[in-house]
Amino acid sequence: MTNNTTTTAMDIHEILDHLPHRYPFVLVDRVISIELGKEITAIKNVSVNEPYFPGHFPYHPVMPGVLIVEAMAQAAAILSFKTMNTKPTDDSVYYFAGIDSARFKKPVSPGDQIVLNVKIDRILKGIWKYSGVATVDGAVVAEAQMMCILKAIEK
């Protein structure tokens, strides 16, 4: 692992280098800062054009809570790959291993900007445990404890 260095601002091109996800499932638009081995702060801009809004809910669009947690997990993946000084490959996948204590405090609507803050709690035997908090305009909209693991893809 890399030492605790602070990195600032990753644009979408660098984000795509550090995430295996692609449209329509990339849920991180910009990284504000990273402290390798510790934490990341990233942004998800919520647009009315998101593919889930026509069905969730047509007359009062709300971003699904599970996608807010997924956005936190994607920020966690970026933090992990940057900390390991590596990038995703076709030979492995970064899986969710668990989600605990997920809480949804306020609805997220089109036009909102979610600030994702994810901290590494511990790394043990290849399992990374994180604490994530998502805010809009300074108010907590969701929080969760997450576990992820990098696994080789069996071919």
Image (tube, rainbow, N blue to C red):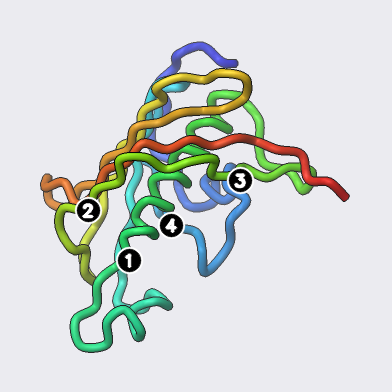
Pointer 1: what residue?
64
**At x 58% / y 42%, what residue is drawn?**
18
N-terminal label among 3 and 2: 3
Instruction: Estimate how packed mark 4 is, as few (under 14), some (14 to 19) or many (20 or more) residues with alpha carbons within 10 Å.
Output: many
Relative image position of residue 139 (x, y in whole percent)? 11, 47
Pointer 3: what residue?
17
**At x 51% / y 11%, what residue is drawn?**
3
N-terminal label among 1 and 2: 1
Q: Nearer the viewer, mark 1 or mark 4?
A: 1
Q: Residue type at mark 1?
A: Pro
N-terminal label among 3 and 1: 3
**Helix, strand or loop under label 1:** loop
**At x 22% / y 53%, what residue is drawn?**
104
* Residue 41 visible in the current orientation: no
Q: Residue type at mark 3?
A: Asp
**At x 57% / y 51%, what residue is drawn?**
16
Toward which corner of the image does residue 97 lie, by quadrant? top right
Pointer 2: what residue?
104
Q: Nearer the viewer, mark 3 or mark 1?
A: 1
Q: Residue type at mark 2?
A: Phe
Location of residue 142 with respect to 123 vertically, above or below: below
Relative image position of residue 11 (x, y in whole percent)? 45, 47
N-terminal label among 3 and 4: 3
Residue contact at pointers 4 and 2, CB within 8 angstroms: no
Instruction: Point out which mark residue 83 bears.
Output: none
Relative to the observer, which residue lies in front, 7 or 37?
37
Location of residue 113 with respect to 4 vertically, above or below: below
Instruction: Point out which mark residue 27 bears.
Output: 4
Residue contact at pointers 1 and 2, CB within 8 angstroms: no
